[in-house]
């Protein structure tokens, strides 16, 4: 059972310079989890062609799908498409189907037939790129790189359109909320983690007066493995340690 | 005038698997901007020792200060310190001053003298590491890598303590809010950007019925350069294009 892997590059000088908060990373994170897809990394970098190209080449090698967010408009700071072309070692070519979609959109939304060259330039994509999703607002895909717009509303629209075909079995998550300090069960949890390498185990302390002081999570696609790992951990805790359980 | 550069690695399986939202990236972004420090990247990766080590080695080479968030507790999923040691090619050693601070904290907050080994293990750091900030809750620094806790309250406390010494001249930001589509000024803005390579120029369209359709930003440490670049751009816009201006 292959778990699809994805990564996200936020091409975002505006995020790094605190001009806007990134909404696309959190959105993609939630949606990919719901889809049973593993998110392997989120990398936020400035709109610099060579750096974006280097990051695309590195990240796409580790995943099934690499998403990029931003840098696909008509202005000088829109470097994502040439950067992806460079990473893939492909020239830039105008894609007639995309030019036609841009022309049609311009006509429909602005009521004009005369499309400026700055708009048509958005149809210049890495050679061999294909269009996916809604044909009237298509997603540009080159090999395993999915280039999405940075404006959150459009990012979500295109992300959802592309991901409709990506479903995989869901992750199953079980949690134990404890009234212990981490150091009081670290050795035990370490042993359970070593004995269950197929279950992802996390330990998240909090110090804010909640009803518990640590949440321990057990996660895998096989719900049986999740419940067994948690049971082995819980069965060795001292009396009064468990505040409540959550999940299967 | 050197502008300090920083990067942030969020060691965060819990973020990538949608269990918690990262608060530390946005916090560090705002604070570094206020301090006049350039944030070069934010990389969120899972708690995997080799991947964290590789990422630390790569990112720290490009910046003055590399911050890490998370993975410094006593449980099996806390891999940041060994990963940093691996990236720096240094062995792990117990740092007596840090062990003493942990003992003192344990005594003060829990009222017990008997400190478990799982707690003292948190004093095992890359050889040559130094302590910075508040001696009762010290920040661990190895070469240019600053290892911060993932719990947001403690991240902020240690980040602020470390950054108190990092001040640099502030960035100066000027904005123009326009009633134009990006394609209507893309060629002009491209030319202004080429003529002012020392000014960072960004263009951020929105489609949500705000009073403007694009915000164009001009940013540098020299306020004179910022205002000149913006004036050259504004002076060539058509009548009625400018909704309002912001900044110097």
Image: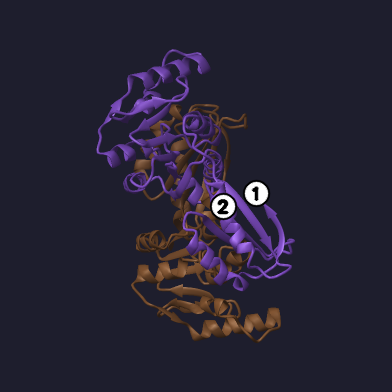
Chain colours: A brown, B purple
The quarter of the displayed image where residue B83 is located: top left
In the rendered view, does A21 fall on the left or right side of A144? Answer: right
Nearest the eye: A41 or A193 = A41
Instruction: Check if mark 1's residue and mark 2's residue have beta carbons within 8 Å.
Output: yes
The subunit carrying tag 2 is: B
Q: Residue at x 40, y 39 (%)?
A: B65
Q: Secondary structure at mark 2?
A: helix
> Where B11 sits versus A169, above or below?
above
Q: Secondary structure at mark 1?
A: loop
Nearest the eye: B112 or A134 = A134
> Does residue A28 appear anywhere in the picture?
no
Q: Residues within 10 Å of mark 1 (few under 14, many from 20)?
A: some
Reading the image, the residue beneath label 1 is: B247
Of tags 1 and 2, the one toward the viewer is 2
Residue B194 at what x, y percent from top left? 48, 64
> Does residue B132 appear anywhere in the picture?
yes
The subunit carrying tag 1 is: B
Q: Residue at x 55, y 27 (%)?
A: A240
Reading the image, the residue beneath label 2 is: B226
Nearest the eye: B212 or B108 = B212
Q: Report whether mark 1 lies on the same chain as mark 2.
A: yes
The quadrant in which the N terminus of chain A is found is: bottom left
The disc, 1 or 2, on the residue closer to the chain's N-terminal end is 2
In the rendered view, does B130 fall on the left or right side of A157? Answer: left
Q: Residue at x 46, y 79 (%)?
A: A130
Q: Which mark is residue B169?
A: none
Disc 1 to disc 2, C-alpha distance: 10 Å
């Amino acid at each position: 059972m292959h778990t699809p892997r994805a990564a996200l590059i936020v091409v975002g000088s505006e995020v790094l310079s605190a001009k806007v908060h990134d909404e696309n990373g959190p959105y993609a994170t939630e949606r990919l989890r719901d889809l049973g897809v593993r998110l392997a990394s989120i990398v936020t970098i400035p709109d610099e062609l060579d750096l974006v190209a280097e990051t695309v080449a590195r990240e796409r090698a580790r995943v099934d799908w690499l998403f990029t967010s931003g840098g696909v408009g008509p202005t000088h700071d829109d470097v994502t498409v040439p950067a992806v072309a460079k990473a893939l070692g492909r020239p830039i070519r105008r894609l007639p189907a995309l030019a036609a979609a841009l022309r049609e959109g311009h006509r429909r939304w602005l009521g004009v037939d005369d499309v400026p060259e700055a708009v048509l330039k958005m149809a210049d994509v890495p050679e061999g790129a294909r269009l996916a999703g809604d044909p009237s607002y298509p997603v540009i895909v080159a090999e395993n790189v999915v280039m999405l717009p940075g404006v959150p509303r459009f990012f979500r629209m295109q992300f959802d359109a592309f991901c409709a075909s990506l479903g995989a079995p869901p992750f199953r998550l079980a949690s134990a909320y404890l009234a212990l300090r981490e150091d009081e069960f670290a050795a035990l949890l370490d042993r359970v983690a070593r004995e269950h390498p197929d279950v992802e185990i996390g330990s998240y302390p909090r110090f804010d007066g909640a009803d518990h002081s640590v949440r321990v999570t057990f996660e895998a696609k096989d719900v049986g493995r999740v419940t067994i790992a948690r049971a082995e951990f819980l069965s060795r805790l001292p009396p009064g340690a468990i505040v409540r359980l959550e999940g299967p």
